[in-house]
Amino acid sequence: MTEPTDALVTRLATLLAKVRLRLEAAGAGWIIGYERERHPVATLCLDDLDPSAEDAELLAVAAAFEAAVKYPGELAPEETLRDGAAPLLPKLERARFVRAYDAVVAGAGKDDAHRLVARPFGADLVTCYVHDGGWRFSYIVAGRAAGWDTTLDTVHSIARSNLYARAEVDHRARAVALDDGYDAARAAIVGDVFYDRVTSDGLRVAVPSRDQLFVGPDVDPDAVRAAYAAAAYPICPHVLVYDRHQVRRAESEILALT
């Protein structure tokens, strides 16, 4: 595995410091410090970053470390699916977020029950799942979901349904920015909200940040990149195509790179 450059480590340490986490080298690995706690990780998950989305990749690692250290997913052995379903919502993250979260789990010597539940969404993005408690949310881990005795498809369906019901979205909208932390996640319900605009070729969408979703055939790549660059929590700088509950890079963008 390629060692991260000093510049990348410094940038990550700066992001972590903003949320009161410390980063220290420790032999062949690293320590994430929080107050008096010390959390070892074997890797910072900074290898093979997508150069076109480097800011988002770095922030995904920092956010995952914060979540795993300060707000780790909980096991709830007595919780049923009925209990767990009501506050369940989807969160859209970069795939690297899951890897970084699970690195903290592995460093603590915890088993797979404490790893994140995630579903591939395409274009290096994943859908994670959270319980929203209002002032904070906790990510759903494998052991908790296993106690519900159901499938990932069912978990995903419930989370999507809850998000659909959370707020009304104009099916004619070209942009969605409700600023509730779930605008990017609404890419998972594009087929429900914008059903009359999805063609056999799919529907162009963009999720430049956690709080923005662009929809429609006229999504402007320059506007997407500008929104991504200005975002407090950037996710993806590319125009995507939503098709069959997943996304892929728009062919026009791929051709522009070749």
Image (cartoon, grey):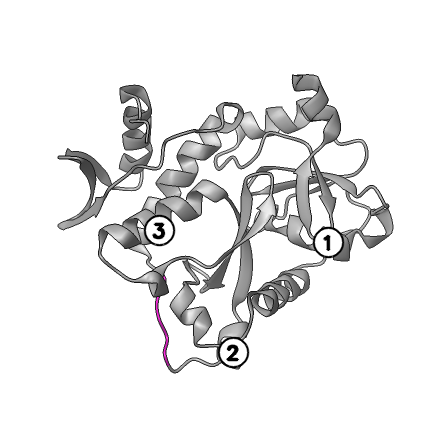
In the image: residue 46, left or right of residue 202: left
Residue 30 pos. (x, y %): 20, 38
Q: Is residue 212 visible?
A: yes
Residue at the spot of label 1: 169
Mark drawn on residue 96 = none
Most distant residue in the front direction: 1
Q: Residues within 10 Å of mark 1 (few under 14, many from 20)?
A: some
In front: label 1 or label 3: 3
Which is nearer the N-term, disc 3 or disc 2?
Answer: 2
Q: CA distance from mark 1 to mark 3?
A: 34 Å
Give whichever of 73, 36 is nearer the camera: 73
Q: Which residues are magenta?
A: 73-77
Instruction: Identify the residue shown where x is 44% and y is 65%.
Output: 133
**Residue 81: which numbered mark, if any?**
2
- At numbered mark 2, what does the secondary structure look like: helix, strand or loop? helix
Residue 206 is situated, as x and y percent measured from the top left of the image, at 66, 37
Q: For the residues marked 3 and 2, what is the alpha-carbon distance in whole angstroms?
A: 24 Å
**Looking at the picture, how far across and down is residue 81, in whole percent?**
51, 78
* Label 3 CA crowd tier, 10 Å (few <14, some 14–19, many 20+): many
Q: Which residue is mark 3?
A: 102
**Which of pointers 1 and 2 lies earlier in the amino acid sequence?**
2
Q: Is residue 7 magenta?
A: no
Give the number of the mark in front: 3 or 2. 3
- What amino acid is at disc 2? Leu
Marks 1 and 2 sit apart, C-alpha to C-alpha, by 27 Å
Q: Residue visible at 48% across and 37% down?
A: 233
Q: Quadrant of the N terminus?
A: top left
* Res. 69 in view: no
- Of the residues under marks 1 and 3, which one precedes in the sequence? 3
Q: Nearer the viewer, residue 153 or 162?
A: 153
Most foreground residue, 227 or 257? 257
